[in-house]
Amino acid sequence: MKILVTGGTGFIGSHTVVELQSAGFEPVILDNYYNSNEKVLTGLKNITGVAYSCHTIDCTNEEAVRTLFKNEAFDGVIHFAAYKAVGESVEKPLKYYENNIGSLLVLLKVMQEFGVSNFVFSSSCTVYGQPDSPPVTEDTPRKPAASPYGNTKAICEDIIRDHVFSNPGLKALSLRYFNPVGAHPTAEIGELPLGVPSNLVPYLTQAAAGLREKLVVFGDDYNTPDGSCIRDFIHVVDLAKAHVKAIELLNSQTEANYYDVINVGTGEGNSVFELINTFEEANGIKLAYTVGPRRAGDVEKIWAQADKATTVLQWTPEKTLTDSLRDAWNWQQKITKK
Ligand code: WQD
């Protein structure tokens, strides 16, 4: 079965291509390389043995997407392609609304024209805002997003829900990711942040590699056991496998107008300090860091109630935080050497 993976050379997209291939699917990559590059295709070939090509298309380009669907008979779509920098979205909200919502509208419209009925959407736990009492279930009320980026995810979920209910036969899942971390154990693919990483783990590994000044922990005065924020850090390979399970579920789904939302996290919360300590123990490295002021917009604590992913997707995370941080460090050392 041929699955279109938009953003297929990105961090989560590339790992999902590997797992789709391994599960017997035929992933087709679409990416405009806005936040990645074609070297990822080499890494994918080294892992899978498949020389993928990449359709370098912007998902907001309706004619280009339509031409692709004319040439390829897709059995499903996994839509990763989106801008995802929280801070930038605050500075340039229109750029985020135009791209993240525009690309979804184009895909849903063209899918309908070609009768493609299985759709998996990359959503985010950011739609929960600061939950009153984690863990969050899928029924936890969404809160006004702390950023335009987060708001695009909530709006996209609503668009998909409404479109599915008006479009018999379309089946869709929105997967709400928590904090994807790590890299492929082969160190052939991993996270490639552009510029100064805003996310914790890539900044941490770059600091450990001497590429950045000290890691700054954004606040140790939160209402948490050690004062630092708590997150649900999930290995990117486990997250990728959840997408394969999602496509398999949609393929087997007979219910018309099927739509659901599923948390994809480990179900465990770890603090920033715990992550730092785990990194040091996993890699035998002492990490220099300082504590700075809180970062505006940060959620104090959030982690998933992930039971639904187990019962509905038959998926459970297999990797530990130690695995994630060991793989992240191996990847960082590999790309630092280049
Ligand atoms: C995690 C924790 C920071 C950097 C965001 C998006 C989410 C998803 C993942 C796209 C926080 C602390 C960070 C640093 C630090 N993005 N931190 N020093 O903000 O939980 O989630 O990225 O899909 O949608 O909201 O991730 O890694 O930026 O921060 O102390 O240099 O690490 O304060 O507590 P976040 P993060």
Image (cartoon, helix red, strand yellow):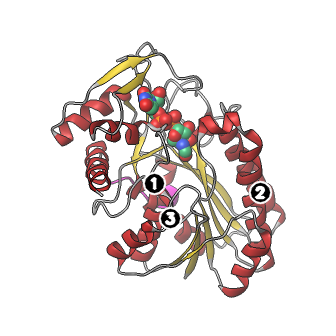
Report the amino acid beneath label 3. Thr
Q: Residue furthest top?
A: 221
Q: Nearer the observer, disc 1 or disc 3?
A: 3
Badge 1: how crowded within 10 Å, few (<14), some, or many (20+)?
some
Labelled disc at residue 9: 3
Does the image show residue 61? yes
At a point 49% along the width and 40% down the height, the residue shown is 305
- Disc 2, SS: helix
234 in relation to 204, above or below: below
Residue 271: x %, y % from top left:
37, 28
Distance from label 1 to label 3 (Cα)?
27 Å
Residue 8: x %, y % from top left:
53, 66
Q: Which residue is disc 2 drawn over?
A: 102
In the rendered structure, are the residues bearing label 2 and label 3 in contact, judged by CB atoms less than 8 Å apart? no
- Disc 3, SS: loop
At a point 35% along the width and 18% down the height, the residue shown is 226
Q: Earlier in the sequence, mark 2 or mark 1?
A: 2
252 in relation to 336, above or below: below
Q: Which residue is disc 1 drawn over?
A: 310
The magenta segment is: 310-318
